Amino acid sequence: MFTIGCHLSASEGFLSMAKTSLAIGGNTFQYFSRNPRGSKARPLDRDDIDRFNAFSAENGIEKILCHAPYTMNACSSDPGLRDLAKEMMADDLSRLSYIPGAMYNFHPGSHTGQGIETGINEIADVLNTVLTADINTPVLLETMAGKGSEVGSRFEEIALIIEKTDLCDKLGVCLDTCHVSDAGYDISADLDGVLDEFDRIIGLERLYAVHLNDSMNPVGAHKDRHQKIGEGTLGKETFEKIINNKRLRGLPFFLETPNELDGYANEIKLLKSLRLED
Ligand code: FE
Ligand code: FE
Ligand code: ZN
C-alpha cells in the first residue's frame, strides 16, 4: 500500500479535502489545524466529520495529518506564547478525537535566544501539560532545518524532548526531507546511513510520517526553502530511493512542495511511477 498525498487547504472541510485528494491521485492529505498566521480554529462541523469518516472508510483514505500552525511556539521566550501553544495544542487534539486514524504534527519550536537546552525543556513542559492518558492521536515532532533558533534539527534534540515527556508513548516523529537535508543529513548520498543514525538516536519505531520536499539549498544550508520534486538539490533519484526504502515504504508520504493542485497531481503521478510493487 503506497500512502501518498499533499498539503490541502482546510477551508472547505474534511469531506471536500478527501474528495480533492482522491481526484489528484492521493489516498491521504495534510491540512492546517487553523490559519497558520492566526490562532483561531474553524468551528467543529460534526456532520462534515461524520461524512468524512464514512467516505474515507469507503475510499481507502487513511493516516491523514493535521499540521499545527507555524506560529505556534512551545519554546518562545514569551511565556504568554508558550501558554497559547498549550491552549492551541490541547484544542487541536480535542478536535482530532473525532477523527480516528488522524495524526497531529507540530514544529517543536524556536527558542528565540534562550538556548537549545531551555527550548527542549519548555517543549517537554508543553507536552507534559497537554498530553493526557485519554489522547489517542499520535503527536509528531517534525524534524527541522535549523533556521534561526529552531529546535529539533538534530536527532539528539528530538530524542531529548521525547525522553523528557512523561507520556512519551503518545509521541512520534515526522521526517521532512528538505529539513533534514538543510539540517546537514545527506540523504541523497547516504539515505541508509541517515536512517541508521535516526534509528540509533531516536529509534525508527518512532517514525510515523514523511514530508516529501525537494530543497532549494545544499546540505547543511539551514534555510528551509522547499522545491518541487526533482527540481531541487535532492533530485528525483533521492525520492525514488526514499519511497521504496524498506524501512520507509510503509509510512504515509505528504508533499509540501510549491504547487497548486495540478502540480501536486503531477508529482503524485511521478512518485507512483517510481514506486516499486509491494
Ligand atoms: Fe511543517
Ligand atoms: Fe514539513
Ligand atoms: Zn519547511
Image: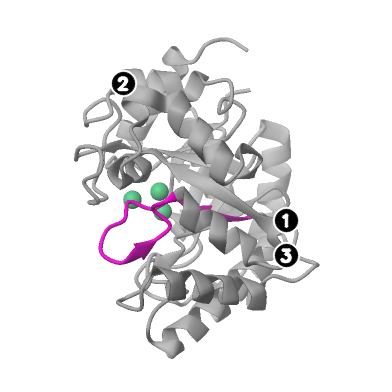
- Nearer the observer, 171 or 203: 203
**What's the CA distance linking mark 1 and mark 2?**
34 Å
The residue at which mark 1 appears reads as: 169
Residue farthest to the right? 134
Dot 1 lies on which element?
Answer: helix
Amino acid residing under circle 3:
Leu
| Residue type beneath disc 1 | Asp
Per the image, the residue denoted by label 3 is 167
Residue 90, label in figure:
none
Q: Residue furthest top?
A: 277
Determine crowd level at label 2: few under 14, some 14-19, many 20+ residues with C-alpha closer than 10 A: some
Q: Could you tell me residue 241's position as x and y percent?
A: 43, 19
User: What residue is shown with label 2?
Assistant: 236
Instruction: Check disc 2 and give the amino acid type.
Output: Lys
Q: Pinpoint residue 9: horizontal percent, then vertical percent.
A: 42, 53
Q: Residue at x 42, y 26 (%)?
A: 191
Please determine whether, in this image, residue 89 is positioned above or below residue 136: below
Residues in magenta?
Answer: 139-154
At x 47% / y 67%, what residue is drawn? 34
Numbered-mark total: 3
Element under disc 3: loop
Label 3 or label 2, whichever lies nearer to me, is 3
For residue 186, which quarter of the picture? Answer: top left
Residue 153 vertical position relative to residue 29 in the rendered view, above or below = below
